[in-house]
Image (cartoon, rainbow, N blue to C red):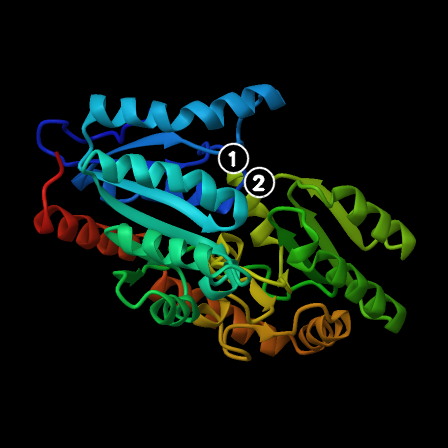
Amino acid sequence: MMVAEGTSARQAPAVLLLGPARAAPSGVATHLNQLFGCALAERFQLSQFQVGSEGRTETRGGAVLRLLFSPLALMVHLVRLRPRIVHINTSLDFKGYWRDLAYLGVSKGLGRRVVYQIHGGALPEEFFARSALLRTLLRRVLMGADVVVLLAEREMSAYRSFAPRARLVRIANCVRVDEGEPVGHAGSAPTLSVAYLGRLTASKGILETIEAVGILRDRGTEVRLTIAGSGEAADLIRRSVAARNLQDQVQLVGELFGEAKRQLWQRTDVLALPSYHEGLPYALLEAMAAGVVPVASPVGAIPDVMQDRVHGLSVPARDPHSVARALGELAADRELLRRLARAARERIASGYSLTQLAEQFTQLYESLLVSGSAR
């Protein structure tokens, strides 16, 4: 259990946050760290109940035992700590949905107010497309939570249509914007510096980005790609780099945190994120806050944040030639690159700061406390 510093158990309402280890390399872990690190922790007594396998070292048997007994462990936490609100961070994928359904049931059974925050995944109508019974269950789950928090306007429309009686609220991910920091690399070097940061999985469009770098190399355009992260596609990515003989243009650097990540953004011109699907990736927000121009596909909440040719360039997913055209345009037009970099930073500072995150969740939590009391 982790409790926010500077709070008083006698004065501050208690909120239990469910999510992965805060040191895990995931967007949800970053979200938890943002909540613990913003002004929200001055108004509420925040603690965490760790769920999921991220950040753990365990055998397969240990994982099975944990899954079986974690609802009971949560029940003990709720009885012992008596939080008035349980904030479940989940996603609409098969594993996360069924795991967190048990936590929702335990929390509601003990009379807690439940925030059910969905970090991406399938849209509800698509999730159980072949089963009317399971769609009905999902609809009841959404209505059973006291509030469902979503990241994107597109998701709000889809969930409103699927479960019109559920209480839905949109709260976007936010990041810290450091005043006075230099704005990205700003195109000062002859070689365009491109980066990807996040989980190494094919659905992030990394292979298409590598192919785009190869296309530009063959045309004589100087581009360097840094890939930071870890994941199941690491070997596939290395093979793709070798197959295109791009070892001089593409570098894999593993996971980056803290100062190392900040330095990456400072020396980078462009974030490559031609994903197949997304929620609201922290890499996008962090890069834009540093003045790094996104080249991204318009999926999930990305269109809410980035307008094509205003804050970055939009490209279709699964299309390396479109990625190559976008990167080539930015390599050739450094004034465009600088204009987009300034607009990207201003966009995050004005609409996606931690101050706004704290205000929105403070209002949400307080509305739950006045609308009913937990046992």
Q: Secondary structure at mark 1?
A: loop
For the point 80% across and 47% down, the residue is: 236
Q: Viewer-proximal residue, 245 or 131? A: 131
Q: Which residue is mark 2?
A: 260
Q: Viewer-proximal residue, 266 or 13? A: 13
For the point 75% across and 63% down, the residue is: 208
Q: Position of residue 162 (x, y in %)?
A: 38, 67
Q: Position of residue 56 (x, y in %)?
A: 54, 26
For the point 33% across and 65% down, the residue is: 163
Task: Identify residue type, mark 1.
Answer: Ala
**Can residue 237 be spotted in the picture?**
yes
Q: Relative to 245, is 321 above or below?
A: below
Q: Position of residue 248 (x, y in %)?
A: 85, 52
Quadrant the N terminus occupies: top left
**Can residue 37 be spotted in the picture?**
no
Residue 267: quadrant of the picture = bottom right
What numbered label is drawn on residue 348? none
Task: Identify residue type, mark 2.
Answer: Ala
Q: Relative to 49, is 209 above or below?
A: below
Does the residue at mark 2 contact the one at mark 1 (Cβ under 8 Å)? Answer: no
From the viewer's perspective, tell me whether residue 41 is left or right of residue 298: left
From the viewer's perspective, tell me whether residue 297 is left or right of residue 348: right
What numbered label is drawn on residue 24? 1
**In front: label 2 or label 1:** 1
Q: Viewer-proximal residue, 192 or 155? A: 155
Rounded to the nearest angstrom, the CA distance separating label 2 from label 1 is: 16 Å
Q: Position of residue 19 (x, y in %)?
A: 41, 37
Q: Secondary structure at mark 2?
A: helix
Q: Relative to 275, is 80 above or below?
A: above
Compare marks 2 and 1 and give the one earlier in the sequence. Answer: 1
Q: Residues within 10 Å of mark 1 (few under 14, many from 20)?
A: some
